[in-house]
Amino acid sequence: MPPANRKLGEKERQVLVKGGVSEKKMPYDDRAKKSMHFSTIEGALSSAASSINNSFVTPFALALKATSSEIALIASLRTLGETLAQIPGALLTQYFSRKTIWTFSTLISRILWIPILLLPFVNVNSPVHLLISLLFAVSFFTAMRAPAWSSLMGDIVPQDMRGHYFGRRNMIAGLAGLTATLVSGALLSEYGFSLIFAVSVVLGLASVYFFAKMHEPQTPVVYHYRHSYTLSLKDLAAALRINRNFVLFTLFLAAMSLAVSIAGPFFAVYMLRDLKISYLWFAALVSFEALITLIFQPYWGQLSDRYGERKILAVTGIMICFVPFIWLFVSSPGHILIANFFSSFAWAGFDLVSFNFLLAVTPSEKRPQYVANHTFLRGLATVAGSLGGYFIVAHLEGRALLFMSGLQIIFFASFLLRLASLVFMTMISDLKTKEHEIIPVRYVFWRAVAVEPAHGLKHAVEYTFRYPYELAKMRKKLWKKG
């Protein structure tokens, strides 16, 4: 670490500024520094494994002759598994270390993919039903680690470095996931689903090795929030007032999750079954979406620092509302590219600021419980939305409504519900200073969507492919000097 009285050279200063780091934010602890490094590697391997599984599980189910209703049921039960895992995942942090919980749940979830990849070779009466059961178990154990992971990373990464660190970590993880999806799409037509799922198992198990190298710090105790389970309406009302921003933020994301999950499972079905695109095209489109998300996360991170998380949450939330509306007019791979670009551009900012906002409104000593409650409520909403999509498909598939038919009705319903969820967004308070509050959302929206994307794209591409290397080299040099 560089001495406090040593000034950086001009070249060093430029690299650090372009990389989003100031001299004051240089590494503060060797164990934390190494843990953040190992977490980045773990995130890349986990992202590669998860991208393969999540991108191709719907095509795999369709190859096993799953119906549209069964695809919706898969989405519903996977979300239900994720939801049910939140409370036990949080409770386990009171009895076991967070690293132990993460390692156990990850190992079980990765191993459960072995019987899934063997399904094409096993003679069973209902392979789709067995797939649904296994995916439910996979989702449960995968999600059980979330409260422990959020708590651990919240303690390891300093608050003033979270935007930069998680933006960079997400960028690397996204690039790994994109590469894995492209390679898997190329291998799929030649070698089948079993091979690519086997690769995902190996990558997932490798991620455990690097996670085990991380340091687990003692959880700090900071008493500035009240959090309790109570059946007293008076105590509950007081708790809601104290944690008002957290409650409104959770309600907003729950409402948005419900609206998104109604249509979420059917975009892949629409592409593969209705538009009849090939697996290679499908992999390319999914990878393109991941690439756009990867490139624009630094862009949204900069805007978040400038205007505040709430403003960016509102801007990207409005954009997300119109994603299913655009899909009403999609009829070719070219149209899908446009829809995926718009969707990825919006989700890149929404996911980034949502996670940072959640860390900001949750106290460190109660973060596992807060994250569990937040995720549990979002999960219930997602299950409700997926079941709603299931019933709509079961009763309206093949019918027409105005100029829409089939899955387009699902897309339109999702569009309307996403707009309705913005009501909660208007009640959330900004976490930034007063100077952020006087800037209207319409101004930020215009700057973010119409004025700055070209400059932001140039900066994001440079940030993605050039500055991480220069920044890492410069940091290594500074640490040696210090």
Image: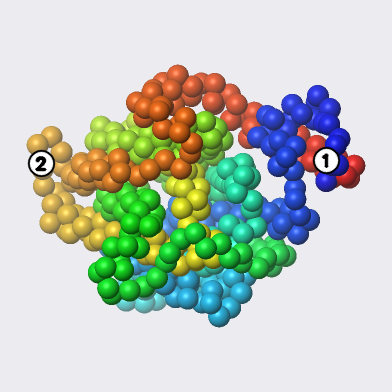
Disc 2 secondary structure class: strand
Q: Nearer the viewer, residue 319 or 274?
A: 319
Number of residue marks: 2
Percent from the top left, x then y, of residue 66?
A: 30, 61
Percent from the top left, x then y, of residue 190?
A: 53, 52
Q: Residue at x 70, y 63 (%)?
A: 214
- Asked whether, in this view, residue 423 is left or right of residue 464, the answer is left
The residue that disc 1 covers is 4
The quadrant of the image that shows the C terminus is: top right
Q: Nearer the viewer, residue 45 or 272?
A: 45
Q: Image quarter for residue 201? A: bottom right
Residue 398 shows in the view: yes
Residue 355 shows in the view: no
Q: Image quarter for residue 369? A: bottom left
Q: Amino acid at mark 2?
A: Leu
Circle 2 packing at 10 Å, graded few (<14), some (14-19), many (20+), is few
The residue that disc 2 covers is 401
Q: Nearer the viewer, mark 1 or mark 2?
A: 1
Disc 1 secondary structure class: loop
For residue 236, which numbered disc appears in the image? none
Distance between the Cα atoms at labels 1 and 2?
68 Å
Percent from the top left, x then y, of residue 261?
A: 30, 53
Q: Residue at x 49, y 44 (%)?
A: 352
Q: Residue at x 25, y 32 (%)?
A: 329
355 lies above or below 309: below
